[in-house]
Every structure is written in C-alpha cells, then in structure tokens.
Amino acid sequence: MTLRFRVAYTLPRRLAEMGISPEAVLRRACLPLGLFDVEKIQVTTDEFFALYRGITESSDDPAIGLKLGTEHRVERYDPVAIAGLYARSFRDAIERIARYKALLCPEELRLSERGDESEVRFIWSFGDEREPPLLVDHCFAWLLGVGRKGTERPLTPKRVELQRAVAHKPMYEAHFGCSVKFKARHDALVFHRADLDLPFVSHNPDLLGVIAPQLELELGKRLPSSSLGERAKSVLKRQLAGQRPAIQQVASELSVSTRTLQRRLSEEGFSFQGLLEEARRELARHYLAHSPLELSEIAYLLGYEDANSFFRAFHHWEGVPPGQWRVGQARA
C-alpha cells in the first residue's frame, strides 16, 4: 500500500503571499495542477519532495524555506503544532509532535540525547531520494518557532548541522542565533539539554484535552492500516539511536503490555528479535545510501556494541560488507 500524507492547506496561500505562484510550483514539480483545489491535499513522499523542489525552483530567495517554516500567527498553526504549543515544556512538545507528525508528513521526528546535548532530527522513512534542502530549512524553522512561541523566549539551539555545502552561512546563523556547521554527517538541530525542560507559557491542559483525543483518534484510524508488527518496527526505527531498544520500551510506545505485544507479534508471524533485525537492516541501507556517515557511526546508531558486530550482520543480510555495498550504490 502506498502511504499518502497531508499537505498543509495553508501552503498555497503562504506561497502566494510570498509572491510565488502555486500553479508554477505544481508545474515545476510535475504534479497535477488541481492538487491545491481539493479540500484535503494528499501526496506520497516522493510527490512531497517534488513539491518542495518545485518551490525551490520557483523562488530565488535563499531564505524561502526558513520563511515558510516561520509562522507567527497561531490561528494558522496546524493541529500538530497546536498540540505542541499547549504542551508542558519544550521536551513534552517535541514528544507530542513526534507522535502526531505522521498524520501530516511522511517523516519521523527523532530525539536523542548525549551528555548535555539533545539532538533533534527529521527522518524521512518512505522516500527513495534525499529530502530537498528547502524542506530541511522549513522543518527546522518550524520546530524552533514552536519552541520560541511556547517558551516566549529567544530560544536558540546550541548549533545547527547541515549536510549540504557551505552557502548563505550568515543568513542561517542570524535566523537560528547559533553557529551552523555545514558538510555535517546529517541534518540536525542540537539544543542544550536543559533547554528542553523549559516550561511553556502557552501550556493549556484544557485545550490540550480537546485536541489530543482527536489526534489520537486520527492516529488510530491510520495505524490499523498497518499490522502491529509494522508499527512495532516503525517504533524501533525511532528508538534506535545509539541504543538497543527493549521490548518493554516498544510496548509502552504502542500502549500495550509486553505480554500482549509478544502474543500479537507471534500471531502475525513476527518475533521481536526479527523485527529489530529488519529495522536495523532497513536503517543501515538508508544511512549507507543517503548519508556520509562513517561505518562506525552507523554501527553506533544501530545500537551495536562495536563495528565488527555491524559488519558481520550486514554481510549476513546483503552478502557483501557495508563499505562495498555503499560503493555499489554510488555507482548505480
């Protein structure tokens, strides 16, 4: 089944306000010209990427992604951003956004912490191509905007990491208020860990109690289209960030008991260890094909104790060492 996701209904209006023709964007993206005329705009991951490449080609403003991701008018926030804004803290907002983001976009928001740093990444799991740089700008500016609006502080990351070559560095540093590292191993917002615990002035448990159940209902409608095994594997991909997730963690994320998860996986013909290996294999292929990460770094992100364990596992999966597989992909 091809997964489709919503495009914010405000996007065409935002483009027009910035002097960009929505029709021109659709033409450059090779998408149907009537796409923006429907009540619920839905696209595949590849179409979503094409849409943002179309925006890039339709604008000569290098800050267009940052501008699209920065919205000061709360009435234009989508429900996921609203749920984040009404959360208790920046951390709570990120966790809520991570849970509900799949309702709007084909991405996962992954938070990993090490020492005094908290790293936030947007992972695109269903696309065959790397996400357009403008989309990365949009996502980073959007999340930071929620944090700044919620805390009512000039919240700034510790640093921003971008995979792309150096370009418009002063512009990015002015927007984010921190140093920006280019040619990084992956795109990431890195915050001071303590900043994630900043309380949100906008916290509103009453309104959150109205919005969250509706989002949970919509999430429940989407999730049954996938088996519990597929959902568990998706959770494993989110949790695989320098650690090996335990079945208890996955069960908690899926709101079932560990025993229930084991039983239902068995009924579907899955095992937890098998799903863990599938998640590792799929992430390994993605990292090797779409990132400049060193093999030892990939091994760490996949939760292996050492690089040799990763090398043996990958050779078992693909029949060749990971370095050789990466070279083959680059030549294809």
Image (cartoon, rainbow, N blue to C red):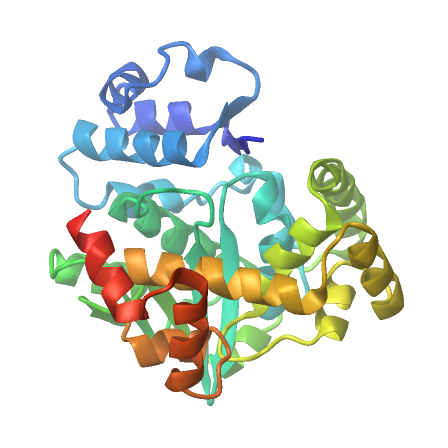
Residue drawn at the location 54% of the way across and 70% of the way down = 240
Q: Residue at x 38, y 67 (%)?
A: 189
Check the image and report above or below for 309 versus 27. below
Foreground of the two, 273 or 318: 318
Left of 92 or right of it: where is 268? right
Quarter of the image with the N terminus is top right
Write the residue at 83% across / 69% down.
Answer: 258
Q: Is residue 256 left or right of residue 146?
A: right
Vertical comparison of 68 with 123: above or below: above
Residue 45 in the image, given as x and y percentages of width and height: 43, 36
Residue located at (46% from left, 73% from top): 313
233 and 256: which is toward the camera:
233
* Residue 75, x across and y down, in percent: 56, 36
Give residue 128's quadrant in the image.
Answer: top left
Above or below residue 12? Residue 286 is below
Q: Position of residue 136 (x, y in %)?
A: 33, 51
Residue in the foreground of this view, choosing between 241 and 75: 241
Question: Along the horizontal axis of the image, is 286 left or right of 219?
Answer: left
Q: Position of residue 85 (x, y in %)?
A: 60, 54
For the question of whether residue 267 can be seen, the reply is yes
